[in-house]
Image (cartoon, helix red, strand yellow):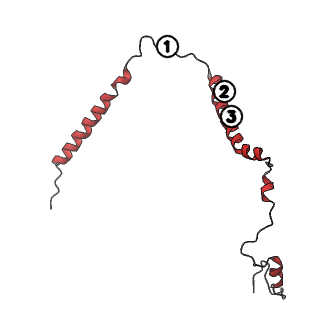
């Protein structure tokens, strides 16, 4: 069996299409080399510190507005903003006995000499 190394018509057409697409897209970028209008003026050079203060001021203002929007509802209701005040409920034991800690102590085995250090059984 011989392998035909000559490009087929489809390959030649795809190569021509790729090259012509590159030339067309490259010619669309030609207006980027245009000169500016005659009455064009250069912007004033304000310096780095001016722009840094503007960008930093906008960021700080956004932080202040978001903080105000978060705390405003609780301030209107007169609630405390203390984070620990929301978690003053009784502790919860997930997976423990339904009757509480007292029931767990009642059902504990009396002979603890045969248990391991991490409540493992031997």
Residue 68, given in percent of the width and then of the height, sits at: 71, 40
Q: How crowded is mark 3: few (under 14 residues within 10 Å), some or many (20 or more)?
A: few
Q: Mark 2 vs mark 3: give the one in front.
A: 3
Look at the picture and state if 89 lies above or below 94.
above
Q: Earlier in the sequence, mark 3 or mark 1?
A: 1
Which residue was labeled with disc 3?
60
Which mark, residue 69? Answer: none
Residue at the (66%, 31%) spot, across then down: 56
Q: How far apart are marks 2 and 1 (CA)?
A: 24 Å
Which residue was labeled with disc 1?
41
Q: How far apart are marks 3 and 1 (CA)?
A: 32 Å
Residue 71, given in percent of the width and then of the height, sits at: 73, 44
Image quarter in which the N terminus is found: bottom left
Look at the picture and state if 35 lies above or below 103.
above
Q: How crowded is mark 2: few (under 14 residues within 10 Å), some or many (20 or more)?
A: few
When asked about the image quadrant of residue 107, the answer is bottom right
Q: Is mark 1 on a helix, strand or loop?
A: loop
Which residue was labeled with disc 2?
53
Image check: 64 left or right of 33? right
């Amino acid at each position: 069996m011989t392998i035909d190394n000559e490009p087929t018509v489809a390959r030649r057409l795809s190569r021509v299409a790729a090259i012509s697409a590159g030339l067309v897209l490259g010619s669309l970028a030609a207006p980027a080399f245009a000169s500016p209008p005659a009455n064009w003026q250069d912007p004033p050079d304000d310096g780095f510190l001016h722009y840094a203060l503007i960008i930093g001021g906008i960021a700080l203002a956004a932080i202040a507005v978001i903080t105000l929007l978060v705390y405003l509802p609780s301030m209107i209701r007169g609630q405390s903003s203390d984070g620990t005040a929301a978690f003053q409920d009784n502790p919860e034991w997930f997976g423990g006995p339904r009757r509480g800690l007292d029931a767990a102590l009642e059902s504990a085995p009396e002979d603890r000499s045969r248990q391991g250090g991490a409540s493992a059984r031997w």
